[in-house]
Image: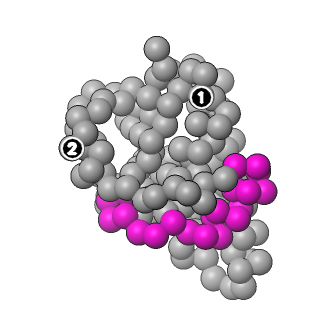
Amino acid sequence: MKKSILFVCIHNSARSQMAEAFINSKYSEKYEADSAGIEPGKLNQLVVESMKEKGIDISGNKTKSVEDILKTGKGYDFVITVCEKEAAEKCPVFPGGGKRLNWWFPDPSKFTGTDSQKISEIGKVRDEIENEIDKFITGSNN
């Protein structure tokens, strides 16, 4: 049986979407991932572009709320928050079983500059998320 992971951030527009996509594209034989936000926003189109650089298409993804996930009654083996360290207090405690982890990444919605500069910064966050996931999956955390 696959282990399940829920990634949570504020808007479910960038970091949690990337994390969900990496799990489901690279490790789908043993894991399944969902993502949700406290205040779901709009999918960040620059994040969509950045993920395309990795060969992963998230353009059809919708943002989801933690509340909606709770209503499904689905349990998770792991609940991982991917908020900024400064925003960690806003990240929810998800009820139910499952190991809780906190990974802190910068918020792409706060990046400034041209689209090209923002995509460059998003790429750094994307790669940090991918590296953290790879370490998590191959490590002894689970």
Left or right of 86 in this view: 112 = right
**Extent of the magenta region:** 37-56
Three-letter residue code for mark 1: Ser
Left or right of 31 in this view: 46 = right
Q: Position of residue 71 (x, y in %)?
A: 21, 44
Q: Position of residue 43 (x, y in %)?
A: 51, 66
- Residue 10 can be seen, yes or no: no
Q: Quadrant of residue 136?
A: top right
Task: In the rendered view, tell whether residue 82 sits above or below residue 84.
Answer: above
Task: In the rendered view, tell whether residue 48 sits above or below residue 5.
Answer: below
Three-letter residue code for mark 2: Lys
In this figure, which residue is indicated by the disc labeled 2? 71
Outermost top residue: 1
Q: Nearer the viewer, residue 89 or 133?
A: 133
Provide the secondary structure element on which disc 1 rests: loop
Q: Nearer the viewer, residue 21 or 117?
A: 21
Left or right of 94 in this view: 84 = right
In this figure, which residue is indicated by the disc labeled 1? 28
Outermost front residue: 60
Name the residue: 56% across, 21% down: 30
Name the residue: 53% across, 44% down: 20
N-term mark: 1 or 2: 1
Provide the secondary structure element on which disc 2 rests: helix
